[in-house]
Amino acid sequence: MGIASYIKEIGRGKEGARSLSQAQAHDLMSQVLDGQVTDLEIGGFALAMRIKGESVAELAGFLEAVHERCIPVRPTHPTIVLPSYNGSRKLPNLTALLALLLAQEGVHVLVHGPTQDPNRVTTAEIFRDLGLPCANDATEIEYAWERREPVFIRTEALCPPLARLLDVRRVVGLRNSGHTVAKLLAPCRTGASMRVVNYTHPEYGTMLTEFLALIGADAMLMRGTEGEPVADPRRNPKLDVFIAGQARPDLSRPAHEGVLTELPVLPRSNDAATTALYIQSVVSGEKPAPSPIARQVECLKQALAAIAPAAQEKTA
């Protein structure tokens, strides 16, 4: 069948390119994920979309196709989904700390992403050093939740065709639409679940607000820390909560300008082993949790409590 007609629309340059409809985007991504197109077409799609940028409708179509190919995850308790695709370059990667603090509150936590990055410290590496589970399938995810532990699953296990699309970066040297979609995944098919959606540039925050409204998402939208879905321990970011796509100012948190008056004592190194030791000291109570992360935990708990009754009605 091929996707040449779609590439022709999106590949006319930044000014001349036309966006696809949601249905067209779904068809395009479905063909890419199912291996129905050539490597040359995949490269053309990746580069054309990188230059043009995704529209809200295109993102919705892409995400729908990816969700159809994810393994089914069916939690029985309120769940937070944390996409961890950037890792850390300068600061300690504290996504695992956020996951552990949420799990201590009785929340199921699913973290997904790559296991390694040659230039960054991944959450998977920190999970390993903390002795936390890295699942290979839905059954192992459920076992971890039964033990009240947060669980990590690599993208290859969660959605193999998406992982193959992400690997295109190794050939062309650039991120593609698969990376954007990966950070928007909501793989839980039952119960109350909320994804944390993070962005690095302010203009993406505006676009993602429109996107979350379009798909009726339950989500927290925030500016990430080096691309990770956790609050910067040095400052309080804006935390925007959406329930069924509707902004909820009553559940959100405003940003606090500038740095905190009392900065947390963070480890001097950001390697996985050192970060894991710091996280253990916080979880054990030896050291206080950075206030921005504690604030994020509380915000997510309140948001989950708000969506849980509606989720129970759907499954009743």
Image (cartoon, rainbow, N blue to C red):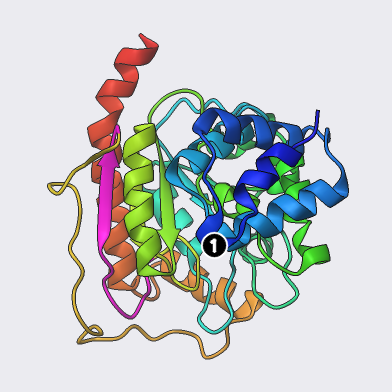
Picture quarter with the N terminus: top right
Residue 170 in picture, x, y percent from top left: 80, 65
Q: Residue furthest top?
A: 316
Is residue 250 depicted above or below 14 in this figure? above
Residue 29 in picture, x, y percent from top left: 67, 37
Residue 295 in picture, x, y percent from top left: 26, 62
Residue closest to the eye, 32 or 232: 32
Taking the spot 53% from the left edge, 72% from the top edge, the residue there is 93
Side of 28 relative to 4 (left or right): left
Q: Quadrant of residue 309?
A: top left
Residue closest to the eye, 135 or 3: 3
Taking the spot 40% from the left edge, 74% from the top edge, the residue there is 286
Can see residue 51? yes
Q: Name the dominant secondary structure of the magenta segment.
A: loop
Q: Residue furthest bottom?
A: 268
Could you tell me which secondary element the residue under label 1 belongs to?
A: helix
Residue closest to the eye, 41 or 154: 41
Taking the spot 83% from the left edge, 33% from the top edge, the residue there is 36
Q: Residue furthest front?
A: 16
Side of 78 relative to 179 (left or right): left
Magenta range is 231-244
Does 234 appear in magenta? yes
Residue that mark 1 sits on: 14
Residue closest to the eye, 22 or 75: 22
Is residue 175 depicted above or below 263 in this figure? above
Is residue 9 depicted above or below 222 in this figure? above
Residue 92 in picture, x, y percent from top left: 52, 78
Q: How crowded is mark 1: few (under 14 residues within 10 Å), some or many (20 or more)?
A: some
| Disc 1 residue type (three-letter) | Lys
Total labels drawn: 1
